Image (spheres, coloured by chain):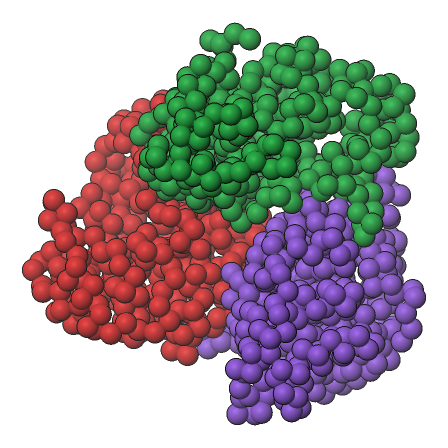
Chain colours: A red, B purple, C green
Amino acid sequence: MSDTPLEQLGLIDHHCHGVVTHDLSRQEFESLLNEASGPSPLGTSLFDSMLGLAVRRWCAPVLGIEPLAGADEYLAQRSALGADEVNRRFLRATSTDWFLVDTGYAPDAVTTPDDLAVLSGGQAHEIVRLESLAERLLAGGTAAPNVPEGVSEALAQTPAVAAKSIAAYRTGLELTPTKPSIDDVGGALGSCRPGTDGRYRIVDPTVSGWLAWTAIESGLPLQFHVGYGDSDVDLRLGDPLLLTGFLRATQEREVPVLLLHNYPFHRQASYLSQVFDHVFMDLGLATHNTGTLSEAVIREALELVPFAKMLYSSDAYGLAELYFLGALLFRRGLAKILDALVAAGEASAADADHISTLIGSQNARRIYRLDLSST
Amino acid sequence: MSDTPLEQLGLIDHHCHGVVTHDLSRQEFESLLNEASGPSPLGTSLFDSMLGLAVRRWCAPVLGIEPLAGADEYLAQRSALGADEVNRRFLRATSTDWFLVDTGYAPDAVTTPDDLAVLSGGQAHEIVRLESLAERLLAGGTAAPNVPEGVSEALAQTPAVAAKSIAAYRTGLELTPTKPSIDDVGGALGSCRPGTDGRYRIVDPTVSGWLAWTAIESGLPLQFHVGYGDSDVDLRLGDPLLLTGFLRATQEREVPVLLLHNYPFHRQASYLSQVFDHVFMDLGLATHNTGTLSEAVIREALELVPFAKMLYSSDAYGLAELYFLGALLFRRGLAKILDALVAAGEASAADADHISTLIGSQNARRIYRLDLSST
Amino acid sequence: MSDTPLEQLGLIDHHCHGVVTHDLSRQEFESLLNEASGPSPLGTSLFDSMLGLAVRRWCAPVLGIEPLAGADEYLAQRSALGADEVNRRFLRATSTDWFLVDTGYAPDAVTTPDDLAVLSGGQAHEIVRLESLAERLLAGGTAAPNVPEGVSEALAQTPAVAAKSIAAYRTGLELTPTKPSIDDVGGALGSCRPGTDGRYRIVDPTVSGWLAWTAIESGLPLQFHVGYGDSDVDLRLGDPLLLTGFLRATQEREVPVLLLHNYPFHRQASYLSQVFDHVFMDLGLATHNTGTLSEAVIREALELVPFAKMLYSSDAYGLAELYFLGALLFRRGLAKILDALVAAGEASAADADHISTLIGSQNARRIYRLDLSST
């Protein structure tokens, strides 16, 4: 990498999860590498992908071995260094100032935001996952009719800097354009039954809609999982255009709504970010999963999205490599696009710096008021 | 720009609107710049976008200032020259022979086709907007059951060279594959009530379907708004594939159907243009809004669309810059693609000229019979 | 073409049809060239397309005339050589080791798999089209309630190496996530009536769902037409994401499911191929139809698809040029992408060879067990 401002910019990763702290077998490593649950008897190693190439090309040198080292050598070196050293190297190499951490997905398996901050040398804030919040209340014995009040109180008191909805993983993004009544939500929650492990999983459009509306009313910036995810998601129900009615109904409130990932619907997300004042987007998860080909995805997003409406996130979970690759591929992809614009006389060098800073840091600072908050 | 034939070709802009003739404040300028209603307190200036860069890079020199001049300098120079001079410069710089002008959207705020012709030094023809035609009849006191006959008579007598449907903005593009009965249309119109300003807004699939069928029967080429638009549109309902049934039902009539804009569904529109004899497409609004990145959008459209089935339009409204950028970015984007094909030996220079002329002018002349018509 | 391994690799074309053996008029040639039914009075020659340019650029030299020869000269030379010589030249120039041939579409007009093998110098296997199998049983007098058993027996005994579903052309890809009962299928088949030509055309979701489930149970790899096709298809119903429920329900069986063509939903197909162990994809029909611009389509597919999950096919039908262009454009497009990765240090030369071999040949060998089968 050359020594350009974008590559030195301290990023804000406005959506990620924790990192796994124990040493990993090859099976465990591959199952965390992409959105497949693991290598298939019908396919071959998940290293055979754009993401696998990126791991070998860019992560290997961070571990002290040659670029494009083979998968076996890579994993051997990873084991030799140990998880703690590996995590520290990759997280520090991201040059991330702030991590905003969704603590709602399998939090027991990964670091807390505080531990992530220590490992990375940056700061971390929590993002509260709405469905998990309601599910924890139910599991903790709160009666269904009292859960809405419990959610509202928790959001009023939370230290989190944002809320997150995973409606896309439950009943889809076509959320109700008016807030459901407390009675309807209580009734819907009353029909929920715990699984054999005592945990609840709310799959109900009334509840998802009510949670999103309540988050908007709390004034917390509201993140939505959109598009790309694992085989649990029905990708059709994660099309951001399904949110159009909800966005139209909430635009007057001036509470930021942030569309995460979006692939392969990122042009649709860019459109929504242009025409709705309160809508923002990122390319999370898609940036590292598409490896060096992510440059084209970033370019497509930039076609319509105002530069003040796009953010950076890694959406990394578990593997330290994914935080590092998210940051590196975002920096490299955006830099290539901006360098080409400057070389063609379509933007000035100052424009390129301004755009990089907006997307990599300033937009998130403004939206989440990070300079005002303390850890 | 180098001195290639494509850059000298007199274009036919087969879909645009009028230009605003008064001087503009920054607020007014930005609110006309893209499909957002204006700069947002949550975002920043709309100059921070690919379109904003294109204005500063390409429009500034037309106003006599340096490429990439800042937004403040640009707007100051624009004011100093005055709207009339600015409009004249940009419109003439488009080198457009004919403008086909949709007069159905906020016509009082902008020039008539005749005024646009005078400003540009070209010629202009009218496109009649179907929904506006019916709404004007209702507002003028025509009884609902008599509106269908009034529409049919107006289409038979219109000097317009095309009709336009904005079904995508009302109830979506899934139009009925058979023509609704006069009784059903009269009934649906009878349920329409005027707004507090006395104006009607027809939001009814039976009426939109009947209008489109009636336009086909009149023999007028029929334009459809498809895809990209402002926050009033539900983009999902503007997917051109929703028109499949209507297109299959009308293909035997050999009346041209023209899909406008199409982004981000332009590959879908190219597919329809390939498999249905009577279907054509353009990239309208998307070309200037995506700035210099429009080259990729044009390339994607060219993958499947027969060269005799693609047209040029600016879909400019209000700002003279948008006519100019529409033409310039179309010329530059197409030229880059064709130059690369010629350089790679994938097409001859004569092929490139032939393709440019088809898309920039000949296809529109043939479809709208422009050489036969008089202003 | 330079002398790289990818260009010498013996391909496996895992989905194509037969070739027409008689001499063709210009009208016949153009009607076979793309998915339009023929040149339109409203458009011009279908040579005016990316595919037409590719024919003139790459096919002309195979017939002994200059690259980019005009359409008239091309067709005259084609006639002078005669269909048999033309077919032999193009098919041999594909360097295809195995052709897997769908014999279910208009088989009387084109070669059998055996004849294709002789012309090409390769080997050929049959793919059995499920809907055609059921329709032939009905047309042959099998009573509707007995058709399911007849289908099951035929699949158990077939020499075919794969089954193919054209549900996308009938009622769409949203197949039932559980297998319909024999009674329901018998009832649905009992409602089918033959056309005036005595042939049946089954348009029923219960039957399509039952056929797909039965193929899975037979253990035969199951191909699905997805996305791009002629004007008979409703492209919206061919979105691969509609298969999500079926794929989730069948993933435990470890029977390969192959998504064909996919354009313009190829990113969606890549996603499904990543997250479902048993799902694979190709770009078939889209590769030759988009001419040299197919490189971008291949690049988009590679963003997410594991390299062990992508295959090559031409989906050629009728015209020998399409087998040749399918193979040539696949080789050239993939080679350009891989060469660029190697030049940028993002992959090694050995990686590039490995990826090429997986996609061009090895994945198909593994899935269809080709090394174990005999012609």
Q: Is residue A94 above or below residue A213?
A: above
Q: Position of residue C204 (x, y in %)?
A: 47, 41
Q: Is residue C311 visible?
A: no
Residue B56 horizontal/vertical position (percent)? 68, 68
Say whether residue C307 is left or right of residue B97: left
Judge by depth and name the residue closer to the eye, C357 or C45: C45
Taking the spot 86% from the left edge, 61% from the top edge, the residue there is: B365
Where residue C79 appears, as percent x and y from the top left, is: 87, 23
From this view, report whether residue B155 is shown above or below residue C98: below
Q: Is residue B374 depicted above or below C78 in this figure?
A: below
Left or right of residue C155: residue C57: right
Quadrant containing the N terminus of chain C is top right
Dividing the picture into quarters, in which one does residue B349 lie?
A: top right
Do we see residue A250 in this rendering? yes
Figure quadrant of residue B364: bottom right
Which quadrant is home to the C terminus of chain C? Answer: top right
Q: Residue at x 81, y 67 (%)?
A: B94
Left or right? Give the position of C10 relative to C319.
Answer: left
Q: Residue at x 32, y 44 (%)?
A: A232
Q: How many marks?
A: 0
Q: Position of residue C157 (x, y in %)?
A: 44, 14
